[in-house]
Amino acid sequence: MSTRDIIDTLAGIEPGSAPDAIRARRLQARENAQKSYLALFEPVDANEFALAERFAIATFVTGLHGESPVASFYREKLAATTDGAALVEAIQVEIQRGRTSGPYGAFPAGPLSIENKAGLIYRVSAERKPELGARLVAAFEHAHLLVFRPRDAASADMKALLAAGWSTTGIVTLSQLIAFLSFQLRVVSGLRTLAAANAQKEAAR
Amino acid sequence: MSAPVNPPVAFTQDELGWVSWIDPLPEAELTERHFAGFVDRARAKSEYFRLLVRDPEVLEARTKTDKDIFYNVADGLPRAERELAAAATSRYNGCIYCASVHARFASTYSKRRDDVQRLLDEGVGADLGERWSAIVKASVALAATPIAFGPDNVEELRQAGLDDAEIVDVINGASFFNWANRLMLSLGEPSK
């Protein structure tokens, strides 16, 4: 039995339960998924990427995946930050504007072109740009790209972030944050689905 | 920032290179904090890891998560099938670089190179037999946004003979590649 971590909390896994025992077999993965969360959301150095920005982007990314315990977790964290609380409503509106289904996008020109799939190219609405500011506007547009059409990413997208005031190190952490959340959301969803399927089987006995 | 060099236009099991779009740390600037982030010191030679090491704490935790999910094979899913989940996720998300590495590993550990190649050539709908197709289908359902993994996927994996610990390995392996694919695709590009 181990201490409840953030994935247990979000997936509703109780200490001593069957899913807890399975997770304990991948102890290093479990501990380091937690350390990844802490490195991103309780960082030793937030100079290149402020905490309120991290929670704002996490709220946007998890919200784009649909409402879930993970989405409400990050939204509450954002609401608890001094600089972020005022942004919650604006971000909710942007989530509604940005929701779609992925992955889509284009492959490099060649035999894979027949698999190209068009979809929403999201841009923050002009009305909310002043409220969010240039850094978050660029980060949200980049996050939407990575969530729904990662194969469309291009070197120009890096230039857009640099132009909006992101440092190279800040871009690395931003990419890790968006990509980590893609992982965390899926582990939580997968474990919840497995537990629910088992509960249903038990009930049907 | 390097110029693009001969990017591949199809999925392959060949060894590819990867070129960063933004500046990795120069080897001369690496400190002990960075080496801790690499976990393996040899990674200091890689452009990709010298870029990610700009945030050493995240890189270290991510590397250790990766190693346990894929290399800890004392129980759970065989290595080949964890690699299959990684390759299928990468094929579906469109990461030609990640797919090349993990398709190659899947082939090495399973000795089913032709089946792996069909996954790359035909895509995630290729018929790879009951067990492999169930793993591919579950990985794809997990990779979709919104996430489409449901009780039917669990049932299909069970029918194919996977127990709960093995299903969790599929969930972990596929989920982890939604992390990896987004880094490789957004920070640079593959080269032949």
Image (cartoon, rainbow, N blue to C red):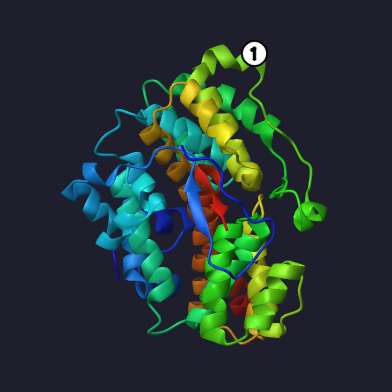
- Camera-side residue of A58 and A146: A146
Quadrant of the image occupied by residue A85: top left
- Which image quarter is the C terminus of chain A in? bottom right
Q: Is residue A196 visible?
A: no
Residue drawn 22% across and 54% down?
A: B36
Residue A63 x %, y %: 58, 39
Tell me if mark 1 has few (under 14), some (14-19) or many (20+) residues whose alpha carbon lies within 10 angstroms of its own. few
Amino acid, disc 1: Glu
Furthest-right residue in view?
A: A114
Q: Nearer the viewer, residue A13 or B119?
A: B119
Q: Is residue B157 left or right of residue B43?
A: right
At 58% from the left and 22% from the top, the residue drawn is A90
The quadrant of the rendering that contains the N terminus of chain A is: bottom left
Q: Which residue is mark 1?
A: A127
Q: Is residue A38 above or below residue B86?
A: above
Picture coordinates of residue A102 (x, y %)? Answer: 70, 48
On the image, the x and y values in percent for residue B116 come to 65, 77
Q: Is residue A42 above or below residue B155?
A: above
Q: Is residue A38 left or right of residue A105?
A: left
Residue sitting at 51 percent across and 84 percent down?
B109
Residue at horizontal 60 percent and vertical 16 percent from the top: A128
Q: Is residue A8 visible?
A: yes
Disc 1 is placed on an element classified as helix
